Image: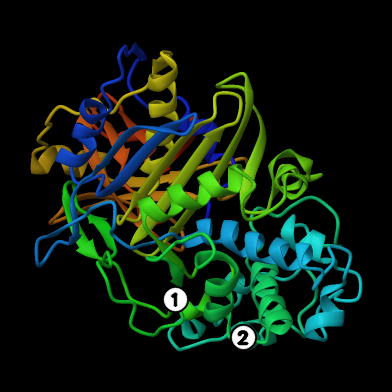
Amino acid sequence: MRHPAGLMGTLLCLMAPAVLAAPPDIEGYLKPYVDTNNFSGTVVVTEKGQTLFAKSYGFADRENHVLNGSDTRYHIASMSILFTAFATLRLVEEDKLSLDDTAGSIVGPLPNGDRITVRELLEEDSGLPDFNDLRNYDALIAVHQTPASVVDQIRRLPPRTEPGGKSQMEEHSACNVLALIIEKKTGLPYAEAMQKLVFGPAGMKDSGADDDRPIGGKLALGYRPDGEFGMKRAPTFHWSAKPGNGSDYSTADDISRWFAEFMGDKLLSAKTRALILGGDKTEVGFGWEGGFDRRFGEDSYLASGRAPGFSSVMFYLPKEELTVLVLNNIEHESNYSIAVDITDMVLGKPHGSFDYHPVTLTAEQRRQFTGRFQFGPDFYRSNGVLEIKDSPQGLLLEWPGGPEAPLLPMGAGTFMDRYYWIPATVTLDAAGHPTQLKFGKFLGSAMPLHGG
């Protein structure tokens, strides 16, 4: 899963007042994240082919004190789409597939399958019903799947939209169909096909598509924030249920190697690279979110992912040939802020920071901040109600349908949502009762706790 719509704009201004860093102290910048258990992973920064910074933090396995490193194998969630697109385009360059082929002609019946092209699957504007939205999704990811079994779940459903329209950011089903197309065109199971088309040729010896077989090597376990500073193991599920859109695992070394070869046109042609980076008709496609970036005043490209226990970001500025890769075995949304702040640091521009100073709340203060808050139709979840609840681990911000995000106290009535990494501020009246909750740029009004 990528950033929810509108979240990236909020993240641009969620941190402390900007400071100017020269030379960049990336390690010092990351320290508050690490010290508060809000970053555990690997960061690599390259510019014009030179590595400027590469360091790992935290544990691949907290219980057994196995440290993360550049060779740690992280699940990369939706960043997998980069490699699915890459494999598909290798088949195109081998004349085994055309961007104008229809999906239905290759994999059989699909909603609008006779009209959806391979290009539209790559551009994520196929309009297919989304596998992740199925009512039985939790049951489906609890057992082993294949691209065929996943695609079978959407064959008889009505389409979500017409193909060729606005991208849905992101179309899980489109990527699942691409995985099945890759199987059909290679005659190999998906994981083996990805080794043949992508990971093997790129020399990515520690990467693959997880089909539920033992992976081996230094594999990171996935965690979630727990309370103000704690961590807990993320729930397990079958990664095979995310073929094409989220099943891949890789290392910082492997991804850096692949990107260098990709930009050097060693595995795909320059013409195809231009199609991927700037040639598509949508701002979302081929695994990237791209276009003019107001923060940097130029085009940028973002690949990101989030799944139970993991989150990942690769941010790229083509003009400066600057890449920031952040792999994290904590499931939350701090990575984007980290990536763009480090980008600013390297460019010598003002940047945000996570300035944390310990704040201890009494039991009475925690009670004061509890309540339910109604947001408007423009909120991330339209007309959503968020509830702040007290727990033995600290305050929690409960979203409709989940998650329960731990709140890290940052000051008087000010918190950081440790899951979505957005600041939240509760306003109290003279009697000490909550009146509103500011969450990022949105305001929610207090409502009766139990509906009265």
Residue 217 in sight in this render:
yes
The amino acid at mark 1 is Asp
Above or below, comparing residue 416 to residue 202 in the picture: above
**Between discs 1 and 2, the one toward the N terminus:** 2
Where's residue 220, x and y in %? 27, 64
CA separation in Å, label 1 and label 2: 15 Å
In this rendering, which labeled residue sits more in front, label 1 or label 2?
2
Q: Is residue 245 left or right of residue 417?
A: right
Name which residue type carries label 2.
Answer: Leu
Horizontal relation, residue 351 to residue 432: left or right? right
Residue at (12% x, 56% y) in the render? 392
> Where in the figure is residue 432, as x and y percent of width and height?
23, 31
Residue that label 1 marks: 210
Residue 442 visible from this viewpoint: no
Report the residue marked by disc 2. Answer: 188
* Residue sitting nearer the eye, 76 or 127: 76
Quarter where residue 46 is shown: top left
